[in-house]
Amino acid sequence: MSAHFRATAAIVFALSASAAVAQDKGYPLKTLLSARQSVVGEPLKYPATGDARVTAAIITLAPGASTIEHEHGVPLFAYMLDGELTVDYGARGKRVYKKGDAFMEAMAVPHAGTNTGNVPVRILAVYMGADGAKNTIPTGQ
């Protein structure tokens, strides 16, 4: 059993146990997302090598600003904290995400996001990767 799989299993168990305890004690629990696929239907797959590494970041885009076109080498959970983001997935279409939306971002499908709102976009991005795996890969297009 790989170290990455063991670490992922331990995290899932801990989160599941915490959720069960929270519900038993009457603490509010709101599931933001439960997914097996990305927003474009790709099955979620963790890197096969390297020790598990989870990276959490806040991404901020000013109104009218865009990301470069890119892919992700690891699963990426995204939660919209503020604003409106339109992501262009090329032939797979565009999607609009707003404050409170949670999604698993596309991995192997090139995409770029644009802040199409009037306030800064703020996204909580949680990359579920491994040592040596790239979280974001510019596509050069």
Image (cartoon, rainbow, N blue to C red):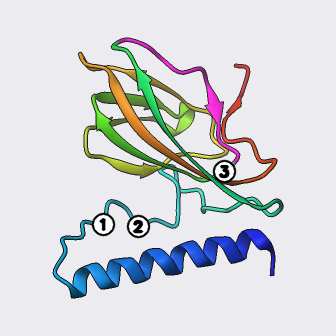
Q: Eyeballing the image, is 94 above or below 74?
A: above
Q: Quadrant of the N terminus?
A: bottom right
Callout 2: 10 Å neighbours few (<14), some, many (20+)? few
- Write the start and end of the magenta stretch as one range: 64-73
Distance between the alpha carbons at the discs numbered 3 and 2: 17 Å
Q: Eyeballing the image, is 127 above or below 23?
A: above
Query: 71 left or right of 124?
Result: right
Q: Name the residue beneath numbered marker 3.
A: 74
Distance between the alpha carbons at the discs numbered 3 and 1: 22 Å
Q: Nearer the viewer, residue 14 or 79?
A: 14
The residue tagged with tag 2: helix, strand or loop?
A: loop
- The type of residue carrying mark 1 is Thr
Distance between the alpha carbons at the discs numbered 2 and 1: 7 Å
* Residue shown at 27% from the left, 28% from the top: 83
The tag on residue 47 is none
Q: Is residue 39 magenta?
A: no
- Are the residues tagged 3 and 2 within 8 Å (C-beta)? no
Q: Name the residue beneath numbered marker 1.
A: 31
- The type of residue carrying mark 3 is Val
Q: Name the residue beneath numbered marker 2.
A: 34
Where residue 19 sits in the image (x, y, percent)? 34, 77
Where residue 7 sits in the image (x, y, percent)? 67, 72
Place residue 98 in its image quadrant.
Answer: top left
- Are the residues tagged 2 and 1 within 8 Å (C-beta)? yes
Q: Indicate which disc, 3 or 1, sits on the residue closer to the N terminus.
A: 1
The residue tagged with tag 3: helix, strand or loop?
A: loop
